[in-house]
């Protein structure tokens, strides 16, 4: 059995690379949103034309990015959503809710400081991890039945 895993959320740290590197040798295909922050913010206006109003600038980018996000989550067997420490990732919360509504297996990744704020998101998840290595071990167990160590 192989897994298609969508890695959503925070784009300012290397958590995705940690998971992908840790999962080497497992039958997993990883997908994610565009993680180049500038490209993600400006894709709408770069492709469809400039907008003098920042709202419409952001709206165009969000719509273009949603094509990739919807496809990635819809095709995923497992959706991992990372909430970082520094920024409020409202888009990550939206992705988690969308994945849950589609009945996707959801793994949430965040530190203990976000436990209370994300209690409803955590309640929808099948696993809540604090470290990327824990996500890798969940995926390894799901695919192989092997416990860590």
Image: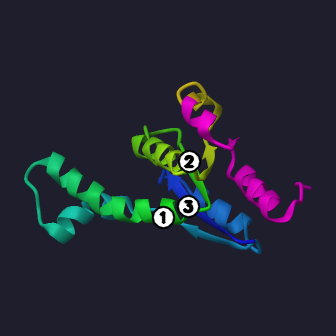
Q: Position of residue 5 (x, y in %)?
A: 61, 63
Q: Residue at x 48, y 43 (%)?
A: 97
Quarter holding the N terminus is: bottom right
Q: Earlier in the sequence, mark 1 or mark 2?
A: 1
Which residue occupies the foreground of this view, 1 or 87?
1
Magenta span main SS = helix
Q: Position of residue 141 (x, y in %)?
A: 82, 58
Q: Residue at x 92, y 56 (%)?
A: 149
Residue, far left: 52
CA–CA distance in space, label 2 to label 3: 11 Å
Circle 2 packing at 10 Å, graded few (<14), some (14-19), many (20+), is many
CA–CA distance in space, label 1 to label 2: 15 Å
Q: Which residue is mark 3?
A: 6
Residue 144 on the magenta span: yes
Q: Position of residue 23 (x, y in %)?
A: 73, 66
What colour scheme was applied to this rendering of the protein?
rainbow
Tag of residue 82? 2
Q: Earlier in the sequence, mark 2 or mark 3?
A: 3
Image check: 2 left or right of 31?
right
Q: Residue at x 47, y 54 (%)?
A: 11
Tag of residue 72? 1
Which residue occupies the foreground of this view, 84 or 1?
1
Q: Which residues, given as a range, are shown in magenta?
A: 120-149
* Local secondary structure at mark 3: strand
């Amino acid at each position: 059995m192989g897994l298609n895993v969508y890695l959503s959320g925070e784009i300012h740290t290397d958590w995705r690379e940690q998971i992908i590197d840790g999962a080497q040798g497992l039958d997993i295909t990883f997908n994610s949103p565009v993680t180049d922050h500038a490209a993600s913010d400006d894709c709408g206006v770069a492709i469809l034309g400039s907008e003098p109003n920042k709202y419409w600038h952001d709206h165009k980018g969000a719509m273009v990015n949603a094509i990739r996000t919807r496809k990635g989550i819809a095709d995923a067997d497992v959706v991992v959503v990372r909430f970082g420490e520094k920024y409020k990732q409202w888009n990550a919360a939206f992705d988690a809710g969308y994945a849950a509504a589609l009945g996707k297996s959801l793994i949430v990744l965040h530190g203990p400081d976000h436990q209370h704020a994300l209690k409803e998101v955590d309640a929808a998840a099948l696993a809540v991890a604090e470290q990327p290595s824990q996500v890798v071990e969940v995926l390894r167990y799901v695919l192989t039945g092997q416990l860590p160590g």
